[in-house]
Amino acid sequence: AQKVTQAQTEISVVEKEDVTLDCVYETRDTTYYLFWYKQPPSGELVFLIRRNSFDEQNEISGRYSWNFQKSTSSFNFTITASQVVDSAVYFCALSDQGAQKLVFGQGTRLTINP
Amino acid sequence: DAGVIQSPRHEVTEMGQEVTLRCKPISGHNSLFWYRQTMMRGLELLIYFNNNVPIDDSGMPEDRFSAKMPNASFSTLKIQPSEPRDSAVYFCASSTAPRNTEAFFGQGTRLTVV
């Protein structure tokens, strides 16, 4: 069975600090997809990134970066120079080769204080 | 593109009443998903359709829940009769899986059963 664990329930930092959100996954599939979604206080789920299991290259998008390591089954998310607008709940998710249903972690509530 | 559109945004109903949630996926997307978000269980998949056909309904909690997709641009999730434990945020999402695997979510329907 697939499982995603986000051990950090809540994180609170001061603006401009760097912060890393951890994600550990379990799957027996050799082909799978990993995702991060953001849920701001308004409640919608916003897609951030998708990574397939054959692509271990790190990804950088502005202040956001992602580190995928198959050896440790982790897909961590780092925000550099955090801003108050980054405050949200962040979800890591996993899907199978068919890339249909998503299995979500429990989410990490990130609060950026001014 | 308007994105995934869900209605209503908020629904308050009395226990025992029938509730119907509606979803219009993104045009051209062939996969549609219904998820439920609660504090206790997090985000969980209820059912998904591919080309209007239900593929996996193993997440539907019980016979009181039913979902239909009569055409490519419309889906409903019905609860009859509703119970207080059905109170949650219900999200609809669509994608072009398996070609492009990221799912785009609607803004959700917050259901309260009193």
Image (cartoon, rainbow, N blue to C red):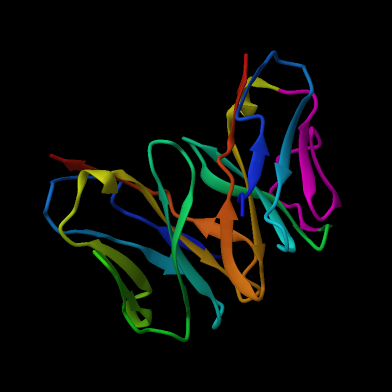
- The residue shown at (21%, 43%) is A84
Vertical placement of residue B93 versus A98, above or below: above
Vertical placement of residue B106 versus A96, above or below: above
The quarter of the displayed image where residue A14 is located: top left
Q: Residue B28, can we see it?
A: yes
Residue B68 is one of the magenta-drawn residues? yes
Residue extent of the magenta highlight: B54-82
Q: Position of residue B29 (x, y in %)?
A: 71, 62
Q: Position of residue B27 (x, y in %)?
A: 72, 58
Vertical placement of residue A103 versus B114, above or below: below
Furthest residue in direction right, as rendered: B70
The foreground one among B61 and B1 is B1
Q: Residue A10, can we see it?
A: no
Quarter of the rendering occupied by the C terminus of chain B: top right
- The residue shown at (72%, 61%) is B31
Tell how many labels. Answer: 0
Horizontal side of residue A47 vs B92, given as left or right:
left
- The residue shown at (69%, 49%) is B59
Residue B58 is one of the magenta-drawn residues? yes
Vertical placement of residue A71 versus B64, above or below: below
Horizontal side of residue B22 vs A21, given as left or right:
right
Q: Position of residue B1 (x, y in %)?
A: 61, 55
The foreground one among A63 and B61 is A63
Q: Position of residue B75 (x, y in %)?
A: 78, 45
